[in-house]
Image: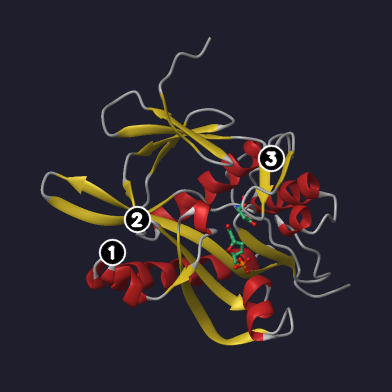
């Protein structure tokens, strides 16, 4: 059986010691949680889909020069990543009013925002990931002003790229959450995209039908969670068993309703 050392277990992923120093194995579980673990279920196959979708997105981001922790895919559920020092912030980028923003400011869900908005949340489950400002982040030493600038610039580049990527497959990228880490190379440090990008941490709406293709289906008890994730994977061209070779690129979907 598996005797690897478990370094960290989160709600949807496990990190194991990697084969070489400075590497980790990121394992995607089938667990789905919401509302800070108050709601939990197993969605069989979700981990495999998220691993594929995440691999595809991180590879494409790497190609445009966004530094990421991703090294290579290992198997259906696991990828080799660089070990980084996680910055304790959840960085949310929003294009369209939805979720907590719509609620907090009384905005209509689905209304495009005047411009992209970046928010920071302090990564702390006990506190329920409270929203924080740059003042809190620098005062408490979670990141320096220079690091915040770099994170903001990367978050906006990632958003610009992903909006286009998803638009090409008929999906509106409403918002998403990302995390960053510090990668050390002797004395040199750089900020890299870490964690994951998958339908677990994005809002993805079908452009033609407005169907939700993300974890809101689970949060809001809408059913069809796995089918929605499969649809995202299929359109990205990474669904195993789909007629197109894996990784051959996104499938163009007409954005006009029929
Ligand atoms: P929110 O509208 O609930 O604040 O969520 C914004 C985005 O961040 C949405 O795409 C879902 C994602 N998200 C996570 O990935 N993890 C979380 O814990 C929360 C609250 C949101
Ligand atoms: N991931 C968080 C949780 O498990 C919240 C969410 O995504 O809605 O509680």
Residue density around tag 2, few if under 14, some if 14–19, many if 20 or more, within 10 Å: some
Kindly identify which residue carries mark 1.
143
Circle nearer the N terminus (2, 1): 2
The residue under the point 68% across, 63% down is 204
Q: Quadrant of residue 77?
A: top right
Kindly identify which residue carries mark 2.
87
Circle nearer the N terminus (2, 3): 3
Quadrant the C terminus occupies: bottom right
Query: Circles 2 and 1: CB distance less than 8 Å?
Result: yes
One can see residue 126 in this view:
yes
Q: Which disc, if any, is residue 63? A: none
Displayed-image quarter of ligand 1:
bottom right
Residue density around tag 1, few if under 14, some if 14–19, many if 20 or more, within 10 Å: some
Spatial distance from mark 2 to mark 3, Cα to Cα?
A: 26 Å
Q: Which disc, if any, is residue 46? A: 3
Residue 102's spot in the image, x, y percent?
A: 67, 79
Spatial distance from mark 3 to mark 1, Cα to Cα?
A: 32 Å
Q: Quadrant of residue 111?
A: bottom right
Left or right side of 142 for 81? right
One can see residue 97 in this view:
no
- Element class at badge 3: helix
Nearer-the-camera pick, 144 or 232 = 144
Position of 134 relative to 186 (above/below):
below
Spatial distance from mark 2 to mark 1, Cα to Cα?
A: 7 Å
The residue under the point 47% across, 75% down is 118
Residue 107's spot in the image, x, y percent?
A: 69, 85
Position of 251 relative to 118 (above/below):
above
- Element class at badge 2: loop
Residue 19's spot in the image, x, y percent?
A: 34, 23
Query: Circles 3 and 1: CB distance less than 8 Å?
Result: no
Left or right side of 165 for 204? right
């Amino acid at each position: 059986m598996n005797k690897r050392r478990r370094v960290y277990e989160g709600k949807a992923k496990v990190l194991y010691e990697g084969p070489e120093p400075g590497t980790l194995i990121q394992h995607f579980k089938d667990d789905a949680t919401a509302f800070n673990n108050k709601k939990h279920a197993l969605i069989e196959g979700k981990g495999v889909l998220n691993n594929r979708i995440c691999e595809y997105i991180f590879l494409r981001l790497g190609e445009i020069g966004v530094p990421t922790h991703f090294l290579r895919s290992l198997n259906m559920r696991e990828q080799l990543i660089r070990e980084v020092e996680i910055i304790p912030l959840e960085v949310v980028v929003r294009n369209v009013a939805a979720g907590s923003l719509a609620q907090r400011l009384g905005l209509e869900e689905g209304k495009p925002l005047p411009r992209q908005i970046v928010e920071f949340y302090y990564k702390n489950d006990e506190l329920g990931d409270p929203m924080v400002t740059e003042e809190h982040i620098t005062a408490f030493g979670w990141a320096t002003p220079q690091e915040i600038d770099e994170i903001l610039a990367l978050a906006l580049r990632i958003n610009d790229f992903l909006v286009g990527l998803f638009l090409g497959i008929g999906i509106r990228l409403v918002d998403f959450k990302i995390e960053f880490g510090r990668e050390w190379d002797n004395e040199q440090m750089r900020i890299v995209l870490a964690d994951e990008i998958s339908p677990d941490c994005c809002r993805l709406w079908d452009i033609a039908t407005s169907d939700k293709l993300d974890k809101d289906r689970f949060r809001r008890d809408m059913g069809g969670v796995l089918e929605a994730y499969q649809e995202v994977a299929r359109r990205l061209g990474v669904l195993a068993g789909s007629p197109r070779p894996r990784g051959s690129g996104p499938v163009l979907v007409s954005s006009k309703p029929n």
